[in-house]
Amino acid sequence: MKHFTSVTQLGDLTAAFEKARYVKENPFADQNLGRNRTLLMIFFNSSLRTRLSTQKAAMNLGMNVIVLDINQGAWKLETERGVVMDGDKPEHLLEAIPVMGCYCDVIGVRSFARFESREYDYNETILEQFIRYSGKPVFSMEAATRHPLQTFADMITIEEYKTKARPKIVMTWAPHPKALPQAVPNSFAEGINMTGYEFVITHPHGYELDPAFVGNAKVEYDQDKALEGADFVYAKNWAAYSGDNYGKVLSTDRSWTVDSRKMALTDNAYFMHCLPVRRNMIVTDDVIESERSLVIPEAANRVVSAQVILKEILQGL
Ligand code: AN0
Ligand code: CP
């Protein structure tokens, strides 16, 4: 594997789950693989899980790790070509990227959607520049349109907890005060569409996702109806994707919050969320604290998903 930017690059899912199971049971089996190799993690946005789990995965593989928070201590970066740089940004991304590439063997990048232009975000302009100009394998730690390490961890978690060959997965929009990217829901939809599980997406009108990610999922605007018989409820907020509303918060309607009445409509479903989560906006305290909540196992599997991917990248060096 050279670059990893989408779960579609996992290839055969049975093989990917088998690799995950092996890594989980034998976390230190490949300590020599990363010897004298350096991972550079670049954060344009905040992180708790991705930062810690990816670093842990790299350490399990014997790698050295350097972390750079672009907004804390690095020079402010200009990202547009052709700009007369007489403002507050002393360095251009087009020099910074190849320089960063000189100091490492593998680069992880976190760069969220900016919501200034849908075209800029959906072209994955920042991530693609890292791939083009760093000279090193690059993997996404959540980019503008996808969060593949999260989705792979979520898929591993479903694989571990499902009791039916074809469970019903419901991804539901839930309210949030601030505009959040579509990366997590896009990526989750992309991953579940690879499994052949029954898949329903529910959200208020106006929150339609890019059809390229929705794929064959059923879209149901009535949340109660969508939840009927669900085996897994995956909650997430996202800002609008469509047209002029791109990046906007159209609703904070708390009747969409996942509570115990909603969970009672399901087939004793597990509750999932990628975290960080705003309690009593996205999900009530009792649901997230219930024994059917998988938020901590999902986070724990972030080490596994990152380690499988880093291992593949290291094997390809
Ligand atoms: C981010 C998002 O919704 O994409 C990161 C989630 C992993 N969440 C926030 O910014 C709160
Ligand atoms: N789920 C996730 O990626 O969390 P962080 O934003 O804390 O990394």
Image (cartoon, rainbow, N blue to C red):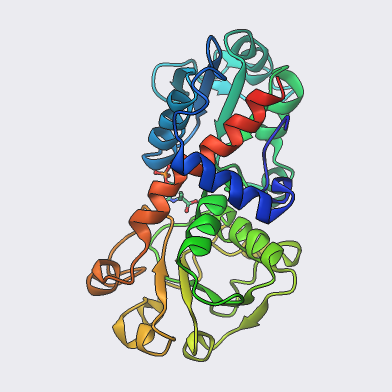
Left or right of 185: which side holds 120? right
Residue at x 61% of width, y 21% of height: 106
Is residue 101 visible from the viewing direction of this image?
A: yes
Q: Quadrant of residue 130?
A: top right
Where is 5 relative to 193, above or below? above
Q: Give the tally of numbered discs.
A: 0
Closer-to-camera residue (16/289): 16
Q: Quadrant of residue 138?
A: top right
Closer-to-camera residue (271/201): 271
**Residue 292 in the image: x percent, y percent?**
33, 72
Residue at x 59% of width, y 52% of height: 17
Q: Which quadrant does the C terminus fall into?
A: top right
Left or right of 132: which side holds 37? left
Is residue 89 visible from the viewing direction of this image?
A: no
**Residue 211 in the image: x percent, y percent?**
74, 67
Left or right of 108: which side holds 242? right
Where is 255 relative to 304, above or below? below
Where is 195 relative to 268, above or below? above
**Residue 139 in the image: x percent, y percent?**
62, 33
Q: Which quadrant does the N terminus fall into?
A: top right
Residue at x 54% of width, y 18% of height: 34
